[in-house]
Amino acid sequence: MPNKIKRSGDGLALQVTQPARAAKLVEETDDETTRLSTIRVFAFDKLLLVIDIDRVKNENVVELVTSAALDTVSIH
């Protein structure tokens, strides 16, 4: 299930999937979001690579994107 914006009592709310929480892209308490990651998304054939740019060094991003591009023979 993808993340999506939904209506709540106070207006709009972000509905976050369990994989996004498990990846620590969102940190929450019971009543509020305490951190939303700044992310960069790279698209390949049949693959989305989502990187938290505050937690992953640029040289590691280069390595991951290069590897994904070579493995999928694509990048969009």
Image (cartoon, helix red, strand yellow):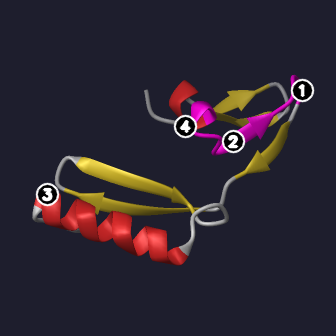
Q: Is residue 38 above or below residue 11?
A: below
First in residue order: circle 3 vs circle 1: 1
Q: Is residue 75 magenta?
A: no
Q: Nearer the viewer, residue 62 or 53?
A: 62
Q: Find residue 72 and name its label.
A: 3
**Of the two numbered discs 3 and 2 in the rendering, the one whose residue sits closer to the viewer:** 3
Give the residue type at disc 4.
Lys
The image shows residue 63 at horizontal and vertical percentages of 36, 70
- Can residue 57 be seen at all in this image of the molecule? yes
Instruction: Examine the image and state in which quarter residue 69 appears.
Output: bottom left
Q: Find residue 6 and name its label.
A: none
Residue under label 2: 26
Q: Secondary structure at mark 4?
A: strand
Give the residue type at disc 3.
Thr
**Of the two numbered discs 4 and 2 in the rendering, the one whose residue sits closer to the viewer:** 2
The image shows residue 36 at horizontal and vertical percentages of 72, 50
From the viewer's perspective, is 59 left or right of 27?
A: left
Residue under label 4: 4
Give the residue type at disc 1.
Asp
Report the span colored magenta.
Answer: 21-31
First in residue order: circle 2 vs circle 1: 2
The image shows residue 73 at horizontal and vertical percentages of 10, 64
CB contact under 8 Å: marks 3 and 2: no
**Of the two numbered discs 2 and 1 in the rendering, the one whose residue sits closer to the viewer:** 2
CB contact under 8 Å: marks 1 and 4: no
Callout 3: 10 Å neighbours few (<14), some, many (20+)?
few
Inter-mark Cα distance, 3 to 4: 27 Å
Inter-mark Cα distance, 3 to 1: 41 Å
Inter-mark Cα distance, 2 to 1: 13 Å
Q: Is residue 47 above or below residue 21?
A: below
Residue ID at (17%, 54%)? 45
Q: Secondary structure at mark 3?
A: helix
